[in-house]
Image: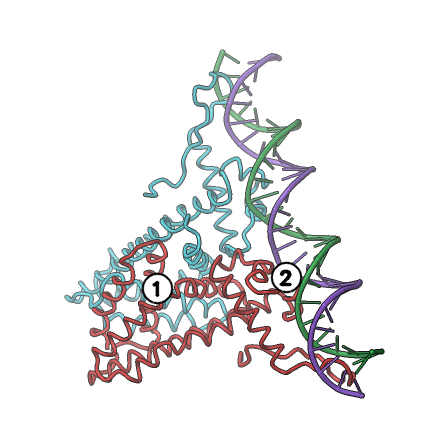
Chain colours: A red, B cyan, C green, D purple
DNA sequence: GGGAACTCTTGACAATCGTCCAGATATATT
DNA sequence: AATATATCTGGACGATTGTCAAGAGTTCCC
């Protein structure tokens, strides 16, 4: 339902034959560039305080250009959300496929998880913000649901592989498993952003205790 | 740290002895009334689109009165959040204390949970919205953290009692347990608000499968 | 090089925002 | 009744918002 992140402007339908012929990807490349500026702004100040002018300031263009590449603010943010999706769903696949033992997988996963929270904290608070917005704004729901499903699959790949390496089977459903990871991550993200230097280590410790019990 | 929901205005310090003597609770009662209007608005349109004028419209007063009872918009919303806390942390205590068997507790809890999602969906999306705002806004963090802790305790009371009735002990920590419940509730709340008539039943089924395995 | 289409800037617009304030109304004491 | 205080109204303000349109600049085909 949301296959395409960016769609070409219907420009030049039966248009005249002279003048500048637009390179096919130039338009989409610019849209991506602006979507990235939008994500940066959203991650920094949150959905409630994100304005088009501030997004434009994060890019190298003026605020007017946004309505050239996007029909309105919703269109821009929706496209940004779809673009965001591709950036976070394969994060742990490398570890899952190369780890040769339970310990190796667990260590690698927790390392990566800690690194994620340390380096991309604001990108993740953006995600929680947008997911909350989907509870109010119909336009976001399909995309948010799809991203949530992708993340659930990602967690499942890690946990089922972990379980497999121990000759076991996960003791919880994929959705419940994702719920635990998601809930814990959000809780410790708030702690981390609040300045708690122990937050990351505590999250890792909690998961290190939890995982062997459920998979 | 956030003991007091509402604090009396420092009015009449060394003031003259004549004129209207304010009833002690009249002021606080009005603050609560306005806080309720604020919660109603927040639940309806979300934090991002909540304005003082719309809050005033939900009450029986004009928009100017808000700055008489609250110093600014943040003060109003913070007070509303603190007031909100008291409304949702004892929801399942009745069931926990009266249930005499595991099945009775499970049925009662799931019934209440379904009723909550059906009747108070918008109050809960407000909660998820505010918790996401706390990731950006420092002013909300202490209150949000405190509410989260209260909810965690509430879940723990239910689950540990359930476990006790089976002569067992919960297999997960209080925080992980809360994370599962919270994550699942949020997921099915989105489904429910999206018009999925099966959402509530599916959540109940998932929890009915999950609970006996972990407690 | 001329011209058409694409790209981007700039300024304007109506609407809405939080905040403030002068004054009207209500209330309770003397 | 007179008066002082508490409460509330409604309009005004400056700032910011999303949106749009007119035009300048750019690019490329003829």
| Label 2 element class | helix
Q: Secondary structure under badge 1? A: helix
Q: Is residue B45 above or below residue A168?
A: above
Figure quadrant of residue B13: top left
The residue pinned by badge 2 equals A63
Query: In the picture provided, is B173 more to the left or to the right than A26?
Result: left
Residue C27 vertical position relative to residue C10 in the rendered view, above or below: above
- Total labels drawn: 2
Residue for point 20% across, 83% down? A166
Direction left: furthest residue: B167
Assess disc 2: are there few (<14), some (14-19) or many (≥20) residues with their C-alpha within 10 Å of its C-alpha: some
Mark nearer the N terminus (2 vs 1): 2
Residue C10 % position (x, y): 70, 57
**Residue drawn at (76%, 81%) of the image:** A19
Viewer-side residue, A4 vs B96: A4
Q: Classify residue B101 by image quadrant.
A: bottom left
Rendering coords of residue A80 (x, y %): 53, 70
Q: Which residue is mark 1?
A: A118
Closest to the observer: C22 or B185? C22
Q: Position of residue B176 (x, y in %)?
A: 27, 65
Subunit of mark 1?
A
Q: Nearer the viewer, residue A157 or B40?
A: A157
Q: Is residue B147 above or below residue A136?
A: above
Who's the residue at 47% across and 23% down the image?
B21
Q: Residue A215 in the image: x percent, y percent?
A: 23, 77
Q: Which mark is residue A24?
A: none
Q: Residues within 10 Å of mark 1 (few under 14, many from 20)?
A: some
């Amino acid at each position: 339902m949301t296959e395409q992140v960016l769609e070409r402007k219907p420009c030049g339908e039966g248009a005249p034959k002279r003048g500048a012929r637009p390179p096919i990807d130039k338009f989409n490349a610019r849209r991506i560039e602006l979507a990235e500026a939008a994500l940066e702004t959203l991650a920094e100040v949150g959905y409630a305080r994100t304005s088009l002018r501030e997004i434009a300031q994060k890019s190298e263009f003026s605020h007017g250009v946004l309505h050239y590449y996007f029909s309105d603010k919703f269109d821009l943010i929706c496209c940004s959300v779809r673009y965001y999706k591709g950036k976070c769903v394969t994060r742990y696949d490398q570890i899952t496929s190369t780890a040769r033992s339970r310990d190796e997988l667990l260590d690698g996963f927790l390392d990566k998880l800690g690194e994620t929270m340390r380096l991309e904290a604001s990108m993740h608070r953006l995600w929680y913000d947008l997911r909350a917005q989907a509870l109010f704004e119909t336009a976001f729901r399909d995309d948010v649901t799809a991203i949530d499903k992708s993340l659930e699959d990602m967690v499942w790949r890690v946990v089922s592989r972990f379980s497999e390496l121990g000759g076991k089977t996960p003791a919880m459903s994929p959705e419940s498993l994702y719920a635990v990871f998601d809930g814990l991550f959000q809780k410790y993200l708030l702690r981390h952003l609040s300045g708690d230097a122990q937050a990351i280590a505590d999250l890792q410790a909690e998961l290190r205790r939890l995982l062997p019990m459920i998979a």
